[in-house]
Image: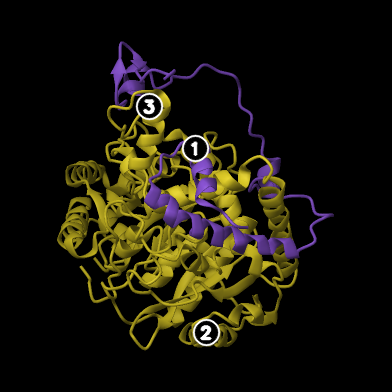
Chain colours: A purple, B yellow
């Protein structure tokens, strides 16, 4: 699958990554090579195969994972904001949303 | 310290030595060797000594009740320990100081362990050489011009160099077993759902497991017993009883069947690794195991499947690093979207960006069925391969890595060549089964070679038994050049 620098820019936009022209130039052939490599899966006829969703073992599937709906202590506002780059008045402050 | 964890623990509970002396020895070695090895991103001397003093203050009988009393352990820097940093080897985390302990960490502390610091790793556990750490690579203690493997390279180097008897790592595609092989130690990846992932920073959530790195198989068994088991904080942990792994180590392996796939010992495998693995197969025959031919016909597709599923899951998991709630934020962005994009550009290294983009691509509109769904179907075929193999044998024996430790810079510019290092290890993560790497000799250059054993779900006791019996009869009898 040929992947152009324009494709890389589009993927970077989707992934919220601002990449440089130099990174685009390096990543385009590398990602194209990896995508070509993974396309070898097309050799396999998987028409009748059910996909393996997730990683659970049969025992994991059978394990009851719901819990009682009980109130428990949470982190609390102070700890939750403790490491925020720009906390303000009990909130996470961010730059304006609309440019 | 070259002492085993179990022996050290017995010396502490008997009063022959104490937790403080054990912690000081480990801290001194970690500090002394860090300029050479770069194995630690944080060494917590005050925290470790305080903890050791708490253990020493216990009564003799209280100490004796603790399975890991006063034993120093190092933790990969993608597992949350309250009071220490968690950087995941990345600048985007700041570093972050988690306000809680991972479940595995809480269990180690409850068992009396002393945590001495956080070990270096490839950024977000993405890599096979440690060259992707944002804080410089870890060096292999056997030869510092060579990689220690990855991504748990700091944990592997710290154990191999005798700084600690045991360290925790994480294994998404081989990140415990491959560095264990390259550093000449034991590395265990448990069954998916055996050890809680709560507090392990997520990379590929359907593949990730916390694992144990140790010089002695018996030490890995003792630590797995402590950290394994159901945890309400991780809904994917299974309600399966945890056996007493240590009590099962000495079982006779006579009559156990080991499956060998000749196809996996063919093309692409280094001759010295092949010869060492063939010798190990003979050794198991001498121990009374039966060798049977098996076939894993879809194993050759495992790297392709893995690099679709792991990157897809990573692209989603790493969306949380956005400069809002913790960690690094790029300055002076005019609007929110610019802030996200710049923070992630400046905070993530090249391999993490490459994988996020690959994962974003395979999940994007129009490509999902062709890549992600296709990979999930082939993943089902790989699981079926293992189920078929395990109907004929108790464990599958393979090399852990195709070559011994390679040189820094050898593969760093060729991501695909780097990914192919994981050819023998990724299948276990895709199938969910447990695996262990055991040292099985040295190359002519004096570099360790690892043997891998893979078993059916929940067969850790058998794998540890097989590894222990091999290690006891075929010890390495050699230690790395850089050693505490």
Q: Is residue A97 above or below residue B372?
A: above
Q: Secondary structure at mark 2?
A: helix
The circle drawn on residue A13 is 1
Q: Nearer the viewer, residue A96 or B295?
A: A96
Q: Which residue does the numbered mark 3 point to in the structure image?
A: B324
Residue at left offset 59%, top offset 76%: B253
Foreground mark, 1 or 3, reads 1
Question: In the image, is residue B421 above or below residue B307?
Answer: below
Instruction: Give the CA separation, mark 1 to mark 3.
Output: 18 Å
Q: Position of residue A42 (x, y in %)?
A: 73, 61
Instruction: Please identify the quarter of the rendering in which residue A99 is found.
Output: top left
Mark 1–mark 3 CB contact (< 8 Å)? no
Q: Which part of the image, by quadrant, shows the N terminus of chain B? A: bottom left
Q: Residues within 10 Å of mark 2 (few under 14, many from 20)?
A: many
Cα gap from disc 1 to disc 2, whole angstroms: 45 Å
Location of residue B335 (image quadrant): top left
Which mark is first along the chain, 3 or 2? 2
Q: Name the residue rendered at 39%, 85% in the picture.
A: B443
Please check whether the numbered discs 1 and 3 fall on a single chain. Answer: no
Q: Which mark is residue B208?
A: none
Where residue B31 sits, quadrant-wise, is bottom left
Judging depth in this view, the residue of B436 and B374 nearest the camera is B374
Mark 2 and mark 3 residues within 8 Å of each other at the beta carbon: no
Q: Please tell me whether residue B483 is drawn above or below residue B325 in the rendered image.
A: below
- Marking on residue B274: 2
Rendered location of residue B259, percent (x, y): 66, 76
Q: Is residue A40 left or right of residue B440?
A: right
Q: Which residue is farthest right?
A: A48
């Amino acid at each position: 699958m040929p992947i152009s620098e324009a494709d890389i820019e589009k993927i970077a936009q989707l992934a919220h990554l601002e990449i440089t022209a130099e990174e685009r130039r390096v990543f385009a052939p590398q990602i194209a090579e990896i995508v070509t490599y993974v396309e070898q899966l097309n050799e396999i006829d998987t028409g009748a195969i059910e996909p393996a969703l997730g990683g659970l073992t049969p025992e994991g599937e059978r394990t009851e994972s719901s819990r009682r709906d009980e109130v428990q202590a949470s982190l609390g506002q102070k700890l939750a904001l403790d490491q925020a780059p720009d906390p303000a008045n009990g909130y996470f402050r961010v730059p304006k949303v609309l440019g | 310290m070259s002492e085993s964890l179990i022996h050290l623990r017995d010396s502490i509970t008997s009063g022959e030595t104490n937790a403080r002396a054990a912690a000081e020895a480990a801290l001194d070695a970690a500090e002394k060797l860090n300029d050479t090895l770069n194995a630690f991103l944080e060494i917590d001397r005050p925290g470790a000594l305080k903890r050791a003093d708490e253990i020493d203050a216990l009564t003799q009988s209280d100490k004796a009740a603790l399975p890991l009393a006063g034993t120093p352990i190092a933790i990969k820097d993608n597992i949350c320990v309250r009071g220490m940093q968690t950087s995941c080897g990345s600048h985007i985390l700041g570093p972050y100081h988690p306000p809680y302990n991972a479940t595995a960490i809480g269990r180690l502390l409850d068992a009396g362990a002393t945590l001495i610091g956080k070990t270096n790793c490839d950024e977000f556990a993405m890599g096979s050489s440690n060259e992707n750490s944002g804080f410089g690579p870890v060096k292999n203690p056997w030869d510092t011009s060579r990689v220690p493997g990855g991504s748990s390279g700091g944990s592997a180097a710290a154990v191999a160099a005798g700084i600690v008897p045991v360290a925790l790592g994480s294994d998404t595609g081989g990140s415990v077993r491959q560095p264990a092989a390259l550093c000449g130690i034991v590395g265990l990846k448990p069954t998916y759902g055996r050890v809680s992932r709560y507090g392990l920073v997520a990379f590929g959530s359907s593949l990730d497991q916390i694992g144990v790195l140790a010089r002695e198989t018996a030490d890995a068994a003792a630590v797995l017993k402590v950290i394994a088991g159901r945890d309400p904080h991780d809904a994917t942990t299974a309600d399966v009883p945890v056996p007493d792994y240590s009590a099962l180590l000495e079982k006779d392996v006579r009559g156990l069947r080991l499956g060998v796939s000749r196809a996996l010992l063919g093309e692409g495998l280094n001759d010295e690794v092949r010869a060492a693995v063939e010798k190990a197969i003979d050794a198991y025959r001498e121990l009374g195991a039966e060798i049977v031919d098996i076939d894993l016909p879809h194993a050759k597709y495992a790297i392709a499947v893995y690099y679709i599923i792991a990157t897809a899951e990573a692209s989603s998991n790493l969306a949380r690093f956005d400069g809002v709630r913790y960690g690094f934020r790029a300055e002076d962005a005019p609007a929110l979207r610019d802030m996200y994009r710049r923070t992630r550009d400046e905070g993530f290294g090249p391999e993490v960006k490459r994988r996020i983009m690959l994962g974003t691509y395979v999940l994007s509109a129009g490509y999902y069925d062709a890549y992600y769904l296709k990979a999930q179907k082939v993943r089902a075929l790989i699981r079926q391969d293992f189920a078929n193999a395990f109907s004929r044998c108790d464990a599958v024996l393979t090399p852990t890595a195709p070559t011994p430790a390679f040189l820094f810079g050898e593969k760093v510019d060729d991501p695909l060549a780097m990914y192919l290092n994981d050819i023998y290890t990724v299948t276990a993560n895709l199938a969910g089964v447990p695996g262990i790497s055991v040292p099985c000799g040295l190359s002519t250059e004096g570099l360790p070679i690892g043997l891998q054993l893979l078993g059916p779900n929940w067969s850790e006791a058998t794998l540890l038994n097989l590894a222990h019996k091999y290690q006891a009869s075929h010890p390495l009898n050699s230690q790395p050049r850089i050693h505490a």
